[in-house]
Structures are given as C-alpha cells and as structure tokens.
Amino acid sequence: MLNKLKAVVSHKQWDQFSNYLEHLIKLQQKSLEQADNEILVYRSQGSIATLRKLANLRNEVREINGI
C-alpha cells in the first residue's frame, strides 16, 4: 500500500502539507493543555497521534522503497 503513495510524498507540495500538519498538531496541543475533562484529553491525544502518523508518512514510504 505504501508503494502506491510514493508519488504523493514525492510531490513538491509535500513540504506545505507537512507545515499544515505541524500547525494542526500545535492547535491540538493547545487544546490538550486547556482540556478540562478526560474525553477532551483523549480526543486531543488521538488527533495528535494521527497527525504525527501522517507527518511521518514520507519517511515510511522512503523506508519501504529504500530511498
């Protein structure tokens, strides 16, 4: 499956997408700091984990393809 994403992560706009993901992570971290109940904490943690997984996608694809 990761082989099919090679064109996506190699595209020149990936850096802009990556910056956007980092921005979203920062927003979720602020939400996490301000959370006043466990549900909001868990949601923010899950969002951050998912966004970090997306941000790391380029590295995963490169590892699979030996780049």
Image (tube, rainbow, N blue to C red):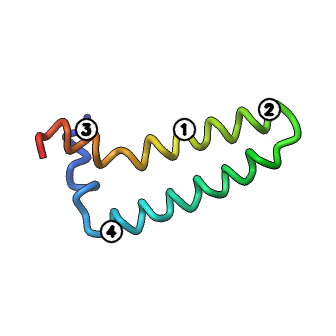
Q: Marks 4 and 1: which is nearer the front?
A: 1
**Residue with the mark numbered 3:** 2
Whole-number angstrom distance, CA of label 3 to CA of label 4: 18 Å
Q: Which residue is mark 4?
A: 13
Label 4 packing within 10 angstroms: few (<14), some (14-19), many (20+): few
Q: Residues within 10 Å of mark 1 (few under 14, many from 20)?
A: few
Tell me if residue 35 comes above or below residue 15 in the rendering.
Answer: above
CA–CA distance between discs 4 and 2? 34 Å
Disc with the residue nearer the chain's start (3 vs 2): 3
Q: On residue 16, which mark appears?
A: none
Instruction: Give x and y (percent) for residue 37.
Output: 86, 35
Which amino acid is tagged 4? Gln
Q: CA distance from mark 3 to mark 1?
A: 19 Å
In what element is the residue under mark 4? loop
Residue under the image location 44 percent in, 40 percent down: 53
Query: In this figure, which residue is indicated by the disc labeled 1?
Result: 49
Q: Along the horizontal axis of the image, is 39 left or right of 57?
A: right
For the residues labelled 4 and 1, the Cα–Cα distance comes to: 22 Å
Q: Report if the CB atoms under discs 3 and 1 are less than 8 Å apart.
A: no
Circle nearer the viewer, 3 or 1: 1
